Amino acid sequence: MKVKFLGTGTSTGVPEIGCKCEVCTSNDIKDRRLRASVLLNIDTKRILIDCGPDFRQQIMDEAFSPLDGVLLTHEHYDHVGGLDDLRPFCMFNDVDIYANSITLNALKVRMPYSFRDNKYPGVPSFNLHEVNAGSTFDIEGIDIQPISVMHYMLPILGYRINDFAYLTDVKHIPEEEYNKLKNLDTLVISALRPEEHISHLNLQEALEEVRKIAPRRTYFIHMSHRIGLHKEVQAGLPENVYLSYDGLEIEV
């Protein structure tokens, strides 16, 4: 499996509009973050996790070939705002979207033009698949394990594929879900900033989750400008724990 981090930032992106802090004005490309998303290449199959408002920019340099599935973690705009830009991929076939019922219902409200019986020509066409956190499913023979986590009061989904797990916008992991996170090679998990936040793990809380889950290696995502300068924060992290950055590619 090859994993490309298309975006590693929080909902505002980095730099934030109007901000002149040292991170937002940094010349280090690793301090510039589009909204969080990853592209998985598994043998000949391609799976996208989340499709935020920066998707068009993120995908332009990638090969134009079919997407075998889009996994959505939840319905917040920074994770679904680019779904309309999937319309070029519909020339191959309708795009399969996988998400929980809350997210699917939200999409029908936000994008009603994609779900009418008589669609306007050119609108994106989706096949919606409801995901139950208690059941695995497969995309073209690739087993997907949903993981139920909490984003403050909102139940959202993470996903495990083989020995790779992706958890974003997490604040709390129910105790029973840790069994799904055993023996991981690679964990991707959000770490918003050093300070406490009502709906996101902060940096210290994320490190505590890493110690509990004990993957071989971890990459933090969904970081705001308050996380600090990439170079400085990375220098203070434990062994095999990394700040991800836009464009990073890894193999699992």
Image: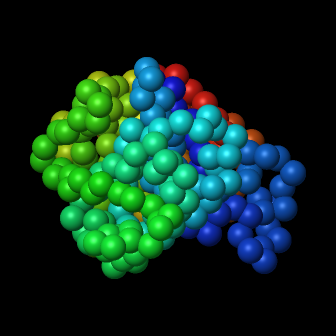
Which residue appears at 36% of the width and 77% of the height? Answer: 112
Which residue appears at 56% of the width and 27% of the height? Answer: 250
On the rendered structure, is 167 left or right of 21? left
235 or 181, which lies in front?
A: 181
166 or 206, which lies in front?
A: 166
Way the structure is coloured: rainbow
On the rendered structure, is 185 left or right of 32? left
Residue 32 placed where, x, y %?
73, 54
62 or 4, which lies in front?
A: 62
Residue 114 placed where, x, y %?
38, 69
**Taking the image as drawn, is residue 171 in sight?**
no
Which residue appears at 39% of the width and 38% of the height? Answer: 68
**Taking the image as drawn, is residue 129 in sight?**
yes
Please say if 10 is above or below 69. below
On the rendered structure, is 101 left or right of 191? left
Residue 172 location, quadrant: bottom left
Which residue appears at 34% of the width and 49% of the height? Answer: 96
Q: Quadrant of the N terminus?
A: top left
Please say if 2 is above or below 187. above
Residue 176 placed where, x, y %?
14, 46
Residue 33 location, quadrant: bottom right
Residue 101 placed where, x, y %?
21, 64
Considering every residue shown, the one lying at the far right of the view is 27
